[in-house]
């Protein structure tokens, strides 16, 4: 057991720190709209051009081919520099891209991976449906083979950034006769294909991140199936393991910055009687508890990386980290309301200030598998408890 | 950077776990007449033979020469098997004696021949509570800025009182005047107190893991309504939460151990964080475990309640919550 970084890793940190100090955008990230997409893509392009995109991606697809530890160093420095949220690039960089690296054929990899890294294409997810949320495997969006194409009909929901995306990782039912986990395929869907219609949904945080997506005789080449026809459940599980494993490393690391800002705020702000918020024992002790838990989150992130380095892929234990991170984020922003007092009535954007992130934090135990689903995974696959009957 | 134990460290853990599972299965605790005649008392010299008290002491001082990482892993196992905190007190006492230059005390402590208890001052400052002082010849005594080792005779008007933790002895006593046999202050005392907190955190992690495992075992065996109760989410989800708390506490305690060993500036920060999350894990898991065991959990014959009581006991050594939280918040945030 050690916390030592090698000389090469230390040099890497210095290099990253230097570059971020010079290059992190000073302007505020737009919270919504086309200007948000433009901002996110421009920032991604800047990282790519300087050689910082896809740190742990293989070099043959435009990445740096570095270790998960270097990826961690990047995120630590990224958070320290206050660099912007990954935004519309989330699915491409942390979901679809890694899935293509693990399961895609050479054409699929060559067509997309470098473009994702360069900020040339935006991806979105198409997993959940109105009737298939936690029970994802009962999804009903149908794909029928016609010649060398799939013809897709159905509906997806809770698709982040669908209105800004060029491609979608889309789960469709290609064999309605097979058992529900066996008849699914993971396909790359061009969002500009005729028959694809997007309807944005306003969230409780006031933005339009989520969408419904409708498919009306959408033709997709069979060549866009990733990992083989009817093999989509396995591919989707690998996608979700990236999300649950390393997908939120940046946010996990950044949470410490958020909490320290809240502690500082509690030392500056006063209540109506002029007393410092941090002088309130209840607030102070909650802050201290959160601080210890945020330290534990960092340690769990390190422990998870250590395990990955030994074992290769994230296992079901990743659900532990995901659940802890989600609940901790919610407690942090909830406490910020007490520190703000009546100022908590003013709503901020979802990624700045406190009240916007508070509202947005409700999604942390819903998206990517609800807290309840994560607990099922932990109970059944980590603890070996009997499956639900 | 690697938070996984090395193969050598795994071996130390496995050996300790096998030994304790054979010699001190927690189910045995229920047959013990009282804490003084508990099974682990007869094992105190065996712990010495195994090198447990001197695990983190240098070889030239008679120790095994390992670091706080190996000690942390050992104390996690001790917590899992409800080993008497004499192991903790004697381990710290040996370090204290060595730091003070009272080398004549070290041998007896690390052999397990000299037992050490601990004095906790009551909030009214009127008297002390001696934890595991009944058979001890030495008593650890912590104050705000000092760490002392005293002879047992330094405490008078001793009377037995009923301990919340059935498996340890508790006495009420008054301090007499008299020189401690070893004393450290300032940075040395702080470092040693942090070290003790690290090992307390490790024991709390072991306790949290033990109640998780007892509960998961019970939920996988017990049937009601024609199914294993572990298949009900009302049972399996609290079990999942127990696993989450264990992972958080274990990861932070490992991180803290490495911070201590490598002399990092944030060692105190990481240790306090470890103790805070480990106490929460031990108390919350034991509480959930009593509930999920139903009537069995409430019965004294079944061991889950002992882990709750042990966590309450360990909390009172050094800074207890909420002082622990208050001091932790006052520390500066360690920047990389």
Image: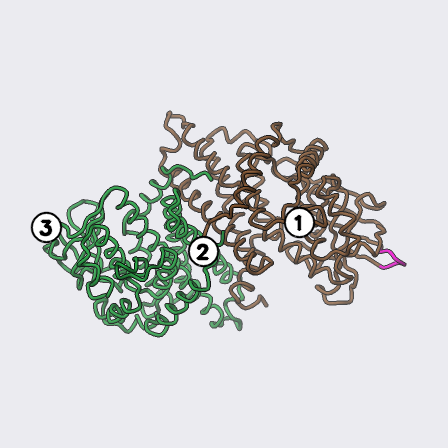
> Residue B171 at x, y = what percent?
17, 58
Q: Are marks 3 and 2 on the same chain?
A: no
Residue B323 occupies which quadrant of the picture? top left
Q: Is residue B286 visible?
A: no
Which chain is assigned green? B
Which chain is assigned brown? A
The magenta span reads: A145-150
Q: Earlier in the sequence, mark 1 or mark 2?
A: 2
Residue that sits furthest to the right in the current view: A147
Which disc number belongs to residue A57? 1
Quadrant of the image containing the N terminus of chain A: bottom left
Q: Is residue A69 left or right of residue B120?
A: right
Quadrant of the image containing the C terminus of chain A: bottom right
Which disc number belongs to residue B176? 3
What residue do we see at 41% from left, 51% from top? B258
> Residue B96 at x, y = what percent?
23, 52
Which disc number belongs to residue A379? none
Q: Nearer the viewer, residue B185 or A237?
A: B185
- Pointer 3 local density, CA inside 10 Å: few below 14, some 14–19, many at least 20: few
What residue do we see at 12% from left, 54% from top? B155
Q: Nearer the viewer, residue B227 or A301?
A: A301
Magenta region's main secondary structure?
strand
Q: Nearer the viewer, residue A209 or B25?
A: B25
State how far apart marks 1 and 2 are (Cα): 26 Å
């Amino acid at each position: 057991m050690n916390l030592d970084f090698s000389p090469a890793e230390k040099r890497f940190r210095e290099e990253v720190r230097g570059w971020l100090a010079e290059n992190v955008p000073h302007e505020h990230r737009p919270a919504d709209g086309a200007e948000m997409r433009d901002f996110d893509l421009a920032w991604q392009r800047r990282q790519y051009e300087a050689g910082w995109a896809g740190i742990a991606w293989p070099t043959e697809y435009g990445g740096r081919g570095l270790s998960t530890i270097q990826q961690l160093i990047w995120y630590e420095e990224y958070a320290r520099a206050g660099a912007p949220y990954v935004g519309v690039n989330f699915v491409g960089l942390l979901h679809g891209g890694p899935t293509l690296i693990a399961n895609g054929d050479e054409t699929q990899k060559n067509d997309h991976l470098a473009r994702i890294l360069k900020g040339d294409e935006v991806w979105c997810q198409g997993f959940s449906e109105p009737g298939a949320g936690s029970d994802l495997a009962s999804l009903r969006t149908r794909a029928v083979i016609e010649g060398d194409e799939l013809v897709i009909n159905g509906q997806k929901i809770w698709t982040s950034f669908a209105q800004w995306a060029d491609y979608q990782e889309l789960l469709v039912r290609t064999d309605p006769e097979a058992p529900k986990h066996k008849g699914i395929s993971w396909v790359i869907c061009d969002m500009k294909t005729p028959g694809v219609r997007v309807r944005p949904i306003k969230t409780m945080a006031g933005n339009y991140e989520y969408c419904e997506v409708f498919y009306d005789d959408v033709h997709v080449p069979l060549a866009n199936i990733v990992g083989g026809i009817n093999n989509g459940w396995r591919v989707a599980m690998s996608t979700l393991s990236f999300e649950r494993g390393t997908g939120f490393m940046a946010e996990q690391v950044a949470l410490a910055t958020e909490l320290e800002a809240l502690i500082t705020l509690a030392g500056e702000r006063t209540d109506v009687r002029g007393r410092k918020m941090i002088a309130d024992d209840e607030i102070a002790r909650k802050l201290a508890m959160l601080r210890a838990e945020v330290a534990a989150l960092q340690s769990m992130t390190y422990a998870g990386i250590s395990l990955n380095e030994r074992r290769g892929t994230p296992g079901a234990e990743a659900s532990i980290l995901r659940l802890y991170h989600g609940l901790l984020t919610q407690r942090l922003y909830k406490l910020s309301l007490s520190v703000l007092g009546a100022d908590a009535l003013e709503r901020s954007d979802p990624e700045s200030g406190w009240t916007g992130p508070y509202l947005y934090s409700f999604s942390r135990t819903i998206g990517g598998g609800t807290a309840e689903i994560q607990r099922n995974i932990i109970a059944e696959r980590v603890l070996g408890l009997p499956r639900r009957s | 950077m690697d938070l996984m134990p090395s193969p050598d460290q795994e071996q130390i853990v496995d050996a300790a776990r096998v030994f304790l599972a054979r010699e001190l299965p927690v189910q045995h605790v229920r047959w013990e007449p009282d804490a003084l005649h508990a099974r682990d008392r007869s094992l105190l010299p065996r712990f010495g033979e195994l090198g447990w008290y001197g695990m983190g002491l240098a070889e030239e001082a008679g120790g095994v020469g390992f670091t706080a990482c190996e000690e942390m892993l050992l104390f996690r196992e001790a917590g899992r098997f409800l080993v008497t905190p004499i192991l903790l007190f004697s381990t710290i006492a040996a370090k204290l004696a060595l730091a003070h230059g009272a080398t004549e005390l070290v041998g007896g402590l690390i052999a397990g021949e000299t037992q050490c208890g601990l004095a906790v001052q009551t909030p009214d400052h009127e008297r002390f509570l001696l934890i595991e002082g009944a058979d001890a010849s030495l008593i650890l005594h912590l104050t705000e800025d000092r760490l002392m080792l005293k002879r047992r005779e330094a405490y008078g008007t001793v009377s037995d009182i009923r301990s919340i933790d059935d498996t340890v002895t508790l006495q009420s006593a008054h301090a007499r005047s008299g020189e401690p046999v070893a004393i450290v202050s300032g940075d040395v005392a702080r470092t040693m107190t942090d070290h003790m907190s690290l090992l307390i955190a490790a024991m709390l992690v072991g306790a949290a893991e033990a109640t998780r495992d007892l509960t998961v075992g019970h939920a996988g065996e017990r049937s009601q309504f024609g199914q294993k109760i572990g298949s009900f989410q009302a049972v399996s989800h609290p079990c999942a939460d127990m696993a989450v708390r264990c992972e958080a506490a274990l990861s932070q305690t490992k991180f803290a151990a490495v911070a201590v060993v490598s002399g990092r500036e944030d060692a105190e920060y990481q240790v306090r964080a470890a103790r805070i999350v480990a106490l929460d894990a031990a108390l919350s898991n034991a509480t959930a475990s009593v509930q999920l065991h139903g009537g069995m959990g409430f019965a004294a014959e079944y061991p889950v309640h002992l882990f709750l009581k042990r966590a309450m006991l360990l909390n009172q050594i050094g800074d207890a919550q909420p002082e622990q939280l208050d001091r932790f918040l006052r520390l500066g945030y360690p920047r990389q």
